[in-house]
Image: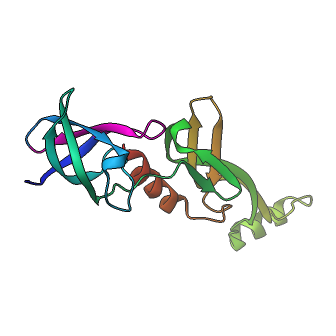
Protein backbone atom coordinates (compact mmCIF):
# COMPACT_ATOMS: atom_id res chain seq x y z
CA UNK A 1 0.00 0.00 0.00
CA UNK A 2 1.01 3.60 -0.57
CA UNK A 3 1.98 5.87 2.32
CA UNK A 4 0.80 9.45 2.26
CA UNK A 5 1.56 12.41 4.51
CA UNK A 6 -0.92 14.37 6.53
CA UNK A 7 -1.48 16.62 9.52
CA UNK A 8 -3.64 15.75 12.49
CA UNK A 9 -6.37 18.38 12.32
CA UNK A 10 -8.25 17.30 15.46
CA UNK A 11 -7.47 14.74 18.11
CA UNK A 12 -9.53 13.91 21.18
CA UNK A 13 -7.10 12.43 23.71
CA UNK A 14 -9.75 11.16 26.12
CA UNK A 15 -11.56 9.28 23.33
CA UNK A 16 -8.44 8.15 21.45
CA UNK A 17 -9.59 9.27 18.01
CA UNK A 18 -9.40 12.22 15.68
CA UNK A 19 -8.92 13.23 12.06
CA UNK A 20 -6.00 13.62 9.69
CA UNK A 21 -6.04 16.02 6.76
CA UNK A 22 -4.13 14.13 4.06
CA UNK A 23 -1.86 15.76 1.51
CA UNK A 24 -4.55 14.82 -1.00
CA UNK A 25 -6.99 17.19 0.78
CA UNK A 26 -9.18 14.39 2.18
CA UNK A 27 -10.00 13.89 5.88
CA UNK A 28 -9.20 10.48 7.36
CA UNK A 29 -10.47 8.98 10.60
CA UNK A 30 -7.64 8.26 13.06
CA UNK A 31 -7.83 5.80 15.94
CA UNK A 32 -5.04 5.50 18.50
CA UNK A 33 -4.94 1.72 18.01
CA UNK A 34 -3.68 2.31 14.44
CA UNK A 35 -0.65 4.37 15.58
CA UNK A 36 2.52 2.31 15.31
CA UNK A 37 5.06 4.93 16.48
CA UNK A 38 6.01 5.48 20.13
CA UNK A 39 4.83 9.10 19.93
CA UNK A 40 1.12 9.48 20.57
CA UNK A 41 -0.90 11.70 18.24
CA UNK A 42 -1.81 15.31 19.02
CA UNK A 43 -3.40 18.07 16.96
CA UNK A 44 -0.87 19.74 14.66
CA UNK A 45 1.49 16.75 14.41
CA UNK A 46 2.44 15.51 10.95
CA UNK A 47 2.09 11.83 10.15
CA UNK A 48 2.67 9.20 7.49
CA UNK A 49 -0.16 6.70 7.05
CA UNK A 50 -1.77 4.21 4.73
CA UNK A 51 -5.12 5.45 3.44
CA UNK A 52 -8.02 3.01 3.39
CA UNK A 53 -11.77 2.90 2.91
CA UNK A 54 -13.71 1.88 6.04
CA UNK A 55 -17.40 1.13 6.58
CA UNK A 56 -18.16 4.79 7.44
CA UNK A 57 -15.61 6.56 5.24
CA UNK A 58 -11.88 7.13 4.83
CA UNK A 59 -9.59 5.79 7.58
CA UNK A 60 -5.88 6.01 8.33
CA UNK A 61 -3.91 2.81 9.03
CA UNK A 62 -0.29 2.18 10.07
CA UNK A 63 0.08 5.74 11.36
CA UNK A 64 3.58 7.01 12.17
CA UNK A 65 4.05 10.41 13.82
CA UNK A 66 6.85 12.13 11.87
CA UNK A 67 6.96 15.61 13.34
CA UNK A 68 5.71 17.03 16.59
CA UNK A 69 4.80 20.62 17.34
CA UNK A 70 6.49 22.41 20.21
CA UNK A 71 3.78 23.65 22.51
CA UNK A 72 4.12 26.98 24.24
CA UNK A 73 4.26 26.87 28.03
CA UNK A 74 1.12 27.64 29.99
CA UNK A 75 2.81 30.06 32.42
CA UNK A 76 5.59 32.65 32.41
CA UNK A 77 7.54 33.79 35.47
CA UNK A 78 8.63 37.32 36.34
CA UNK A 79 10.82 37.11 39.43
CA UNK A 80 8.42 35.81 42.11
CA UNK A 81 5.27 36.36 40.00
CA UNK A 82 3.86 33.62 37.78
CA UNK A 83 1.21 34.49 35.16
CA UNK A 84 -0.86 32.32 32.83
CA UNK A 85 0.00 33.33 29.25
CA UNK A 86 -3.61 33.09 28.09
CA UNK A 87 -4.60 35.72 30.69
CA UNK A 88 -2.24 38.40 29.35
CA UNK A 89 -4.22 41.06 27.52
CA UNK A 90 -1.58 43.75 26.97
CA UNK A 91 2.11 44.24 27.68
CA UNK A 92 5.01 46.47 26.76
CA UNK A 93 7.82 48.65 27.99
CA UNK A 94 7.11 52.21 29.10
CA UNK A 95 8.94 55.05 30.82
CA UNK A 96 7.87 56.76 34.03
CA UNK A 97 9.19 60.21 34.94
CA UNK A 98 9.81 60.87 38.60
CA UNK A 99 11.08 64.13 40.11
CA UNK A 100 13.16 64.55 43.23
CA UNK A 101 14.76 67.45 45.07
CA UNK A 102 18.46 67.97 44.79
CA UNK A 103 20.63 70.57 46.43
CA UNK A 104 23.60 71.92 44.54
CA UNK A 105 26.26 74.49 45.30
CA UNK A 106 25.28 77.74 43.65
CA UNK A 107 27.83 79.22 41.24
CA UNK A 108 29.08 82.55 42.57
CA UNK A 109 30.63 85.60 41.02
CA UNK A 110 33.30 86.78 43.47
CA UNK A 111 33.28 90.44 42.44
CA UNK A 112 29.47 90.79 42.56
CA UNK A 113 29.34 89.13 45.99
CA UNK A 114 32.16 91.38 47.28
CA UNK A 115 30.32 94.55 46.17
CA UNK A 116 27.02 93.29 47.61
CA UNK A 117 28.67 92.49 50.93
CA UNK A 118 30.27 95.99 51.06
CA UNK A 119 26.90 97.67 50.41
CA UNK A 120 24.84 95.62 52.86
CA UNK A 121 25.98 94.50 56.31
CA UNK A 122 23.29 91.78 56.39
CA UNK A 123 24.35 90.21 53.07
CA UNK A 124 24.90 86.45 53.18
CA UNK A 125 26.61 84.58 50.43
CA UNK A 126 24.14 82.29 48.58
CA UNK A 127 25.76 78.86 48.88
CA UNK A 128 23.08 76.30 47.99
CA UNK A 129 20.32 76.03 45.43
CA UNK A 130 17.47 73.49 45.49
CA UNK A 131 16.16 72.11 42.19
CA UNK A 132 13.56 69.57 41.12
CA UNK A 133 15.34 67.09 38.83
CA UNK A 134 13.50 64.55 36.61
CA UNK A 135 14.66 60.93 36.46
CA UNK A 136 13.42 58.39 33.93
CA UNK A 137 12.62 54.79 34.86
CA UNK A 138 11.80 52.09 32.27
CA UNK A 139 9.38 49.36 33.28
CA UNK A 140 7.68 46.29 31.83
CA UNK A 141 3.92 46.45 32.26
CA UNK A 142 1.35 43.67 31.93
CA UNK A 143 -2.43 43.94 32.05
CA UNK A 144 -4.46 40.75 32.37
CA UNK A 145 -7.95 39.87 31.21
CA UNK A 146 -8.97 39.98 34.89
CA UNK A 147 -7.89 43.67 35.00
CA UNK A 148 -4.82 43.04 37.16
CA UNK A 149 -1.90 45.33 36.35
CA UNK A 150 1.76 44.55 36.98
CA UNK A 151 4.93 46.64 36.69
CA UNK A 152 8.58 45.60 36.93
CA UNK A 153 11.09 48.45 36.92
CA UNK A 154 14.37 47.97 35.04
CA UNK A 155 16.52 49.18 37.94
CA UNK A 156 14.64 47.12 40.57
CA UNK A 157 14.05 43.75 38.85
CA UNK A 158 16.10 40.60 39.16
CA UNK A 159 15.60 39.98 35.41
CA UNK A 160 16.02 41.94 32.20
CA UNK A 161 12.70 43.57 31.31
CA UNK A 162 13.78 43.74 27.66
CA UNK A 163 14.51 39.99 27.53
CA UNK A 164 11.13 39.22 29.16
CA UNK A 165 9.35 41.44 26.63
CA UNK A 166 11.08 39.57 23.77
CA UNK A 167 10.09 36.27 25.42
CA UNK A 168 6.46 37.44 25.57
CA UNK A 169 6.65 38.49 21.90
CA UNK A 170 7.84 35.01 20.92
CA UNK A 171 5.36 33.12 23.12
CA UNK A 172 2.28 35.19 22.35
CA UNK A 173 2.90 35.36 18.60
CA UNK A 174 2.95 31.53 18.58
CA UNK A 175 -0.69 30.53 18.35
CA UNK A 176 -0.17 26.77 18.65
Instruction: Report the number of discs.
Output: 0
Asked whether 81 falls inside the magenta stretch, the response is: no
The stretch of residues the image draws in magenta is 9-23
Q: Main secondary structure of the magenta part?
A: strand
Quadrant in the picture for the N terminus: bottom left
Quadrant in the picture for the C terminus: top left
Q: Residue at x 73, y 52 (%)?
A: 100
Q: Residue at x 11, y 45 (%)?
A: 23
Q: 55 or 107, which lies in front? A: 55
* Lateral position of residue 41 relative to residue 163, left or right: left
Q: Is residue 85 above or below residue 48?
A: above
Quarter of the image holding residue 11?
top left
Quarter of the image holding residue 87?
top right
* Lateral position of residue 111 relative to residue 58, left or right: right
Residue 94 position within the rendered picture, expressed as x and y whole percent measured from the top left: 52, 47
Residue 92 position within the rendered picture, expressed as x and y whole percent measured from the top left: 49, 46
Q: Residue at x 67, y 59 (%)?
A: 79
Residue 158 position within the rendered picture, expressed as x and y whole percent measured from the top left: 66, 65
* Lateral position of residue 83 relative to residue 163, left or right: right
Asked whether 19 falls inside the magenta stretch, the response is: yes
* Residue most extreme to the front: 55
Q: Is residue 43 above or below residue 108?
A: above
Q: 20 or 155, which lies in front? A: 20
Residue 18 position within the rendered picture, expressed as x and y whole percent measured from the top left: 33, 37
Amino acid sequence: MVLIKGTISRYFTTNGFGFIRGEDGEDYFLHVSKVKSATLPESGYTVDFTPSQGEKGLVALDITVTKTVQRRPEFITFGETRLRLSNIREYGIAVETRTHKTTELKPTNYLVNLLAAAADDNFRLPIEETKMVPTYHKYLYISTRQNHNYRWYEDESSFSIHDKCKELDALLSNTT
